[in-house]
Image: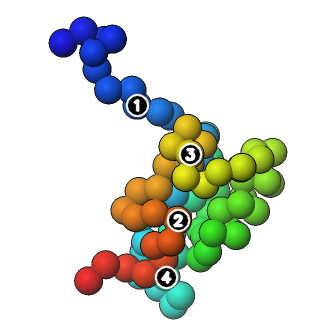
Amino acid sequence: MTESASLYMTHPRIMVLGVQPGTPPFRIVEIDGEVIGEARAITDVLLAAAAFGITVHDLDDPDVVRWVGGDKYTWTPRR
């Protein structure tokens, strides 16, 4: 397989990892490869991005945000 035939993999600045159990459950947020904190809702992700000077217009754009272990609506642990 050549590079031109391989799948394109984005490297977004924001990565939201899978839901962690807690009261309330949370997701770890990384920006530019560095863990910057926890998010308990979509608004926490947007506030973290803004604190780092990142404007997010579309939370579903994989070039901007990568959601690991669920999408932007996944905020409870899987059973």
Mark 4 and mark 3: Cα distance apart in space: 24 Å
Q: Secondary structure at mark 1?
A: loop
- Density class for disc 4 (Cα within 10 Å; few <14, some 14-19, many ≥20) is some
Q: Which mark is residue 72?
A: 2
Residue 34 seen in this snapshot:
no
Tell me whether circle 1 and circle 2 mark residues in contact (CB < 8 Å).
Answer: no
Considering the numbered disc 2 on the image, is that residue within a helix, a strand or a loop?
loop
- Measured as percent of width and height from the top left, residue 2 is found at 24, 9
Disc 1 crowd rating (10 Å Cα; few below 14, some 14-19, many 20+) is: few
Tag 2: residue type? Lys
Left or right of 51? Residue 44 is left
The numbered mark at residue 25 is: 4
Q: Which residue is mark 1?
A: 9
Instruction: Give x and y (percent) for residue 53.
Output: 81, 45
Q: Earlier in the sequence, mark 4 or mark 3?
A: 4
Residue type at mark 4: give it: Pro
Q: Earlier in the sequence, mark 1 or mark 4?
A: 1
Which one is earlier in the sequence, the residue at label 1 or at label 2? 1
- Residue ID at (18%, 12%): 1
* Residue 79 in picture, x, y percent from top left: 26, 83
Give the residue type at disc 3: Asp
> Which label was assigned to residue 61?
3
The residue at the point 32 percent across, 26 percent down is 7
